[in-house]
Structures are given as structure tokens and as C-alpha cells.
Amino acid sequence: MITVKINGFEVKVEKDTTILEAANKIGIKIPTFCHDPRLRPHGSCRICTVEVKGGRNLPTACTTPVFEGMEVETESEGVVEARKEILDLLLANHPLDCLTCQQAGRCALQDLCFQYDVKESSYGGAKKEFEIDNSNPFYYSDQNKCILCGKCVYVCSQLQCTDAIGFAERGFPTHIATPFNQGLEESTCVSCGNCVSVCPVGALVPKSKEKFRYWETSPVRTTCSYCGVGCQMDLLVKDNKIVEIQPAMGPSNEGLLCVKGKFAYNFIGHPDRLKAPLIRKNGKLEEGTWEEAYELISSKIAEAKETLGPNSVAGLSSARCTTEENYLLQKLMRAVVGTNNVDHCARL
Ligand code: SF4
Ligand code: SF4
Ligand code: SF4
């Protein structure tokens, strides 16, 4: 174990631990834009810059490993000055659209400008004028707001393994793009939205049907009901309506979702959604009660079993039910109806 001092507090950590991880261990928060513990550290944004006693420059906490006897200051005068300068440079070509930006309230740039009292940039000069990529059905890419943290690119390549996007051009016009700038719709993007979930600013945002602010929502942790993987997710709920879904850290999804889990939730409050069983009477579907429906189902099954035998009946279940519900359906078919004809919608 290695002993280091951070802001005067001693902490013992294993070899190869970074300054950021050591600080996290004792609850000292170092700001980051580009860091994600699931990705290989890349130190792109430099906002996690800290001061190491005896060091000649300010290293990035997310990429610098600790050494025995290291003494670190995370909010010294020099560090605060450097962070202000980084924010000043980021704002130099960032549209200050916070009043109408969808990301306000969940934006790391907004939060850090507030924390370090940076209201505007002291640099004049060119502004980015990229066209907003509106071609994906589920999210926008507004490269004028991108701070080039790289998280979207690395999440897409290292975690999602799709490699749909990358850095294009060099210097001032650098931006995140699909190959040959053909737009998201023409790319290999599978619309999982994992890049959208990690973007720290308003450069990648979902196409929301509802107008809401993040502070008006409450998260409800749940398990995605689309398939058997069991991804954990937080439903962001405003006025009893789901307005967005954020992936949560679960053992099977580790903070990732697929397109269905991330974006396909509008059916929940859809006016066409069935709220009662429909029973065909005189050739027309009419709303009935569950008692009526169950009565009809059991009488039809009994009739089929009686006249054509138990193998004339099959039970088709769904990946969107729980394991317990699927267990019950096969048990009902095997033990009560007497058939092994049991299958599942995931094999359609
Ligand atoms: S991305 Fe953040 S800082 Fe930029 S306009 Fe939106 S809320 Fe403001
Ligand atoms: S939505 Fe998924 S596949 Fe498409 S660019 Fe983002 S991370 Fe990659
Ligand atoms: S689009 Fe968002 S996540 Fe991607 S590099 Fe820009 S700021 Fe970072």
C-alpha cells in the first residue's frame, strides 16, 4: 500500500491508483469532464488538474498514479487559476445558451462555471458554426456546444463497440463526426444513446417530447422490461409522466442501455395503450373485464383440450414478463393443460 496526503488528509491506496481515485476514496471531489471509470483514462479536458508538492507543472488527477509520500492539493490558488483559464478557453467558442439549453441543470460546464465564478470568456474571436445533425430519430448532435471531452467517442468504441463516431479535423474546427461527415442516419450508429447519456454538456441531447428541467424530475430506479438482460435504469418522472430514461449501474449493464431501453418509452403513456381486455363479440372487439376474459380463455382451452387433445393448445410467453411469470405460464401449460407446447416471443 502507498500512503499519500491529499489536502492534508492521509490515505492509503494500492499501487497504480490515480490521484483522482485516491481523492474519491476519502470523499474529496475533483471536477472532471472527460473521466469515466469504465473507460481507459485519457486526460483530454485537463479540468482535473491538481498541484503535487515538488512538481514542475499541474498534472491531471485522472491519469497520474500516486507515489509514496506524495502530497497533493486539489484547490490551491494555482489549481483554481488553471481551472478558471480552462473554463475561459472553453467558453471562448461556446454558445451561452443556458436559458434555453435542454441540458441546463445537468451540465458540467454550467456547474463548474458557477463553482469557479466564470461568467463569460475574456477571449474574443471565431465561433463554431456547425449544422446541427438532426438525422438520428432519437437524439441531436449540436457540435457548437461540444467541449471535445471525447467521452462519446470512447463510450461508442470501448463499451458499445460500434465505433460509429470519431474526432474529425484538427485545431479549431475539430468536432465529433461520423465517417466522411455523412450524418448519424447514414452511419453505423445503432442509436443506443450511450454517447448521449455520458455527454457532460448539451452537445448530444435526446429529442424530448416533453419540455422539462432536470430539477423538476424525480428518478425512479427500475429494471428494463424489454428483454431478459435486466438492465438497470432510472426513469426521470415529471408530473407522473416519464420524460427521459438514464442508464443506471447494474451488474448486467454497467451503465449502458440499448435503443429500446433508452428511448422507447412513449408507449407507457400512449393514448392507444390497452387498459382493459378486448373481447370479440359479434365480430367486433369490445372492452370487457378481466374476469370475463379469463372465463373465456379457460373455457376455450378446456374445449380444445376436450375435442382435439392437450397438444392442440400452446402457451406463448414474453421476454417482457418476469422470470417468475414465465415460470408460471410453462407450469400452467405443462401441469394443468398437459402440453409441452411452450414458447416465447423472443424466438419469433
Ligand atoms: S451546454 Fe451547458 S453551458 Fe452550454 S449552453 Fe447548454 S447548459 Fe449552458
Ligand atoms: S448512439 Fe450508440 S452507436 Fe450511436 S454514436 Fe452513440 S454510442 Fe455510438
Ligand atoms: S459531444 Fe459531448 S461527449 Fe462528445 S466530445 Fe463533445 S462534449 Fe464530449
Image (spheres, rainbow, N blue to C red):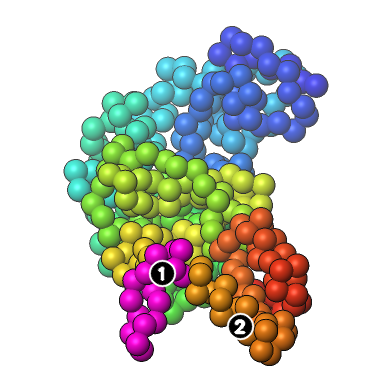
Q: Give SS at disc 1.
A: loop
Q: Is residue 219 left or right of residue 294?
A: left
The vertical placement of 248 against 317, above or below, is: above
Amino acid type, mark 2: Glu
Q: Which residue is painted at 74% across and 77% down in the image?
A: 339
- Front residue of 227/119: it is 227
Q: Is residue 81 left or right of residue 296?
A: left
Amino acid type, mark 1: Pro
As for residue 168 lying within the magenta part, the answer is no
N-term mark: 1 or 2: 1
Rendered-image quadrant of the C terminus: bottom right
Q: Position of residue 16 (x, y in %)?
A: 74, 33
- Front residue of 146/258: it is 258
Residues shaded magenta: 277-293
Name the residue carrying label 1: 277
Q: Position of residue 169 (x, y in %)?
A: 43, 65
Q: Quadrant of residue 64?
A: top right
Quick one: label 1, few (<14), some, or many (20+) residues within 10 Å?
Answer: some
Q: Position of residue 263 (x, y in %)?
A: 42, 62
Q: How far apart, in angstroms, are the residues tagged by discs 1 and 2?
A: 21 Å
Q: Which residue is painted at 33% across and 85% down in the image?
A: 284
Rendered-image quadrant of the N terminus: top right
Q: Is residue 130 left or right of residue 40?
A: left
Name the mark on residue 303: 2
As for residue 286 lying within the magenta part, the answer is yes
Quick one: label 2, few (<14), some, or many (20+) residues within 10 Å?
Answer: few
Q: Residue furthest top?
A: 8
